[in-house]
Every structure is written in C-alpha cells, then in structure tokens.
Amino acid sequence: MPLTRAIVCPPSETFSSGLTTSSLGIPDLKLALVQHRRYCEVLESCGLHLTHLKPDSRFPDSTFVEDSAVFSRTFAVIARPGAQSRRGEVDAIQEVVSRFSKVVYRINAPGTLDGGDVCEAGDTWFIGISERTNEEGAKQLETFLRQDGCSSVLIDIRERPGLLHLKTGMSWIGGNRLVVVDELFDAPFPVGYEKIRVSPDEAYAANCIPVNNHLLIPSGYPILNETFVKLGYHTISLDMSEFQKMDGGLSCLSLRFGTYSR
C-alpha cells in the first residue's frame, strides 16, 4: 500500500540541548529549520499529506517524532521512550495518532520502546534491543504485530558499536532488499533478503527511507547513491548535517503511514 500521510515536528529553540553521542559540534538551529522545511517539501512532493506538530521547547529531541509511535497496517502503538527525558513526548503524539488509527495500543512499563528500533519490511518486522528499547517493550510490540498477522525478528544491537537504534544501521527499501552496515551484516535476518552493504565511510546513509516511488538518502554519500541508481531507484538527496549532530537520521524526522492504518 502506498504511503499517504506523515507526522512531522520542527526542531525547537532548545534543539541543541537534546541527547547526542556525536562529536560533530553544536547544531545551527536556523540551518536545521531550513533543512527540516526542505525535508517536508520533499515528503509532500512524494505524495504525502503532512500533519505538523508545534515545536516543544520542553523536549529538545521532539523533532525526532519517529521514536514516539509506530504505525502498522491496522493499528498504531504509542511508544515508551527509553530515555527518561523523552517520555513526555508521547503526550503530544497520542492525540494526533488517534486521528488516523482506530486501534491504538501503548507500550507499558517496565517495557521501553523507541520507534527508531522498529524496521518494517512488509509482513516482517525487525525490532532492535538497544539502550533505548528493552526486551519487554519489544515483546509487547511482537504481541500486537502477531495479532495483525505479521512476524517479527528481535536483533540485539547492544554489543554492536556505533548503533543508537536499529535503524541507525539498516533500512528496508522495498521488496526483499535491506540496506545494512557492517556491524549488522551477520544479524539474524531471515533467508531470502538481499543485503546491500554500506561502506564504513558512508554508514550514516544506511538510514534512508522509501517514499512511494522515491528513495530519500542523506546527501554526501555518492557510492551508496550510485548503487541505488544502478538498481533502478529514483533517489532524492537531503542535507541532514544539523540533525546528524544530534544522532538523528532521515527516518527519525517523520512518522509515515498509509490510509490502511485508519
């Protein structure tokens, strides 16, 4: 089913005080806002209708809306972020999510779940066990997915260096294709998937997102971009420099779903 909608939230004035493990410097808010507007314009050009949340200075990381909820074909799940400082973000997202999904579940304590650890690949879902998503939270999501006829695979990334979330190091780009960094290449993916290996120098670009007939990729990674073009993808490159400084990638900036989620 095609994607038709996305929820987005621009960075607030406190953006630079959010959580990060990066050593890339302090983000420029003015430039981050320009990059976010361009991101939204591209989503709209790919056919998505956007719902814009208001920036919330109480939560510096709230522009990364993907972590606050998960959409499946027939339901949505309100997440329970692993970072205590982000727990309040779900209050703003719950009302909006309820507009688009008749069935809304919640991850309950002691479970934790960040949406960045959840990678949908058709009827199979990959769920990362990380510093932000614990096994209890992953199993709660597994239960919901099973009711929807979907299978799931848990992948523990806690001992895999450089991965904040599962989708820091992998993406599903449609069909049987996964984009995967070296640290995840030996992960327990089911037989039948074609893994596109990302070179260490371009690892950040492993977080890319298919949006209908386009593939969004961060700019500055020509080797992976060329690989996608040769495979027949129509790529759109987006400058993500200021969000990269705060451990954010392309998928982090939106919750994308189709009308089948209603």
Image (cartoon, rainbow, N blue to C red):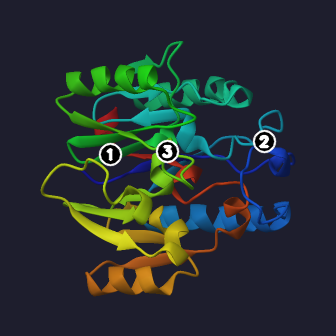
Tell me the CA gap for discs 2 and 1.
Answer: 26 Å
Q: Nearer the viewer, mark 1 or mark 3?
A: 3
Q: Nearer the viewer, mark 3 or mark 2?
A: 3
Tell me the CA gap for discs 3 and 2.
Answer: 27 Å
Q: Nearer the viewer, residue 253 or 257?
A: 253
Q: Residues within 10 Å of mark 1 (few under 14, many from 20)?
A: some
Q: Nearer the viewer, residue 102 or 157?
A: 157
Tell me the CA gap for discs 1 and 3.
Answer: 22 Å
Badge 2 amino acid? Pro
Badge 1 amino acid? Glu
CB within 8 Å, label 2 to label 1: no
Quadrant containing the C terminus is: top left
What's the residue at 64%, 68% (across, down)?
Answer: 240
Is 60 situated left or right of 221 in this image?
right
Q: Secondary structure at mark 1?
A: strand
Q: Nearer the viewer, residue 67 or 134?
A: 134
What's the residue at 65%, 28% (across, down)?
Answer: 92
Q: Earlier in the sequence, mark 1 or mark 3?
A: 1
Q: Position of residue 87 (x, y in %)?
A: 66, 25
Q: Position of residue 83 (x, y in %)?
A: 67, 31
Q: Secondary structure at mark 3?
A: loop
Residue 120: give its label: 1
Residue under circle 2? Answer: 60
Q: Is residue 234 above or below residue 180?
A: below
Q: Residues within 10 Å of mark 2 (few under 14, many from 20)?
A: many
Q: Residues within 10 Å of mark 3 (few under 14, many from 20)?
A: few
Is 2 situated left or right of 66 in this image?
left
Q: Position of residue 151 (x, y in %)?
A: 20, 34
Residue under circle 3? Answer: 159
CB within 8 Å, label 1 to label 3: no
What's the residue at 85%, 61% (across, down)?
Answer: 26
